[in-house]
């Protein structure tokens, strides 16, 4: 009995430590846009060079707020259809960006979408 207690206590401490480490590590989901850069993706959405007319755009405070573009369906019943990139990027935006507790500012040099390379 004493021997099993010697193994149970360290094992339970290890499990508790592992659970606390997982909860503090934060949220991560691979992004298929903006070279997996959540700051650029959540503040700017899709790359305008690749999709010049996206059907949605992020809005401040960049923690899940967005605007549907008036030239797409909906809200315009005669507008353009959403592309596969519009749909996938919008779903990723809704699942990733609300995980941010607050919206931070860019503190690096230059524009965020050009650091370290254009994305």
Image: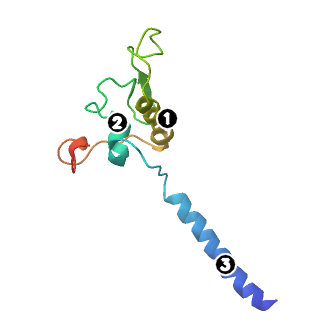
Near mark 2 (Cα within 10 A), the count class, few <14, some 14-19 or many ≥20, is many
Q: Residue furthest bottom?
A: 3
**Disc 2 versus disc 3: distance between alpha carbons?**
43 Å
Q: Earlier in the sequence, mark 2 or mark 1?
A: 2
Tell me the SS state at disc 2. Answer: helix
Which quadrant: the C terminus?
top left
Residue under pointer 2: 43
Tell me the SS state at disc 3. Answer: helix
Q: Earlier in the sequence, mark 2 or mark 3?
A: 3
Q: Is residue 71 left or right of residue 77?
A: left
Q: Residue furthest left?
A: 110
Q: Residue furthest top?
A: 78
Q: Residue at x 37, y 41 (%)?
A: 33
2 and 1 marks in contact (CB < 8 Å): no
Residue under pointer 1: 91
Between label 3 and label 1, give the one nearer the viewer. Answer: 1
Q: Is residue 88 left or right of residue 19?
A: left
Q: Is residue 67 above or below residue 113?
A: above
Q: Is residue 20 above or below residue 78?
A: below
Q: Position of residue 80 (x, y in %)?
A: 40, 16
Inspect this view and state whether residue 64 appears. no
């Amino acid at each position: 009995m004493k021997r099993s207690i010697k193994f149970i206590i360290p094992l339970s401490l290890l499990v508790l430590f592992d659970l606390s480490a997982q909860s503090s590590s934060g949220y991560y989901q691979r992004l298929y846009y903006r070279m997996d850069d959540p700051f650029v993706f959540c503040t700017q959405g899709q790359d305008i060079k690749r999709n010049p007319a996206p059907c949605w755009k992020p809005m401040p405070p960049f923690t899940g707020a967005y605007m549907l573009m008036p030239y797409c369906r909906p809200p315009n019943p005669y507008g353009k259809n959403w592309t596969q990139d519009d749909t996938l990027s919008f779903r990723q935006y809704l699942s990733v960006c609300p995980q941010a507790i607050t919206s931070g500012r860019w503190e690096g040099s230059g524009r965020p979408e050009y650091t370290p390379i254009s994305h």
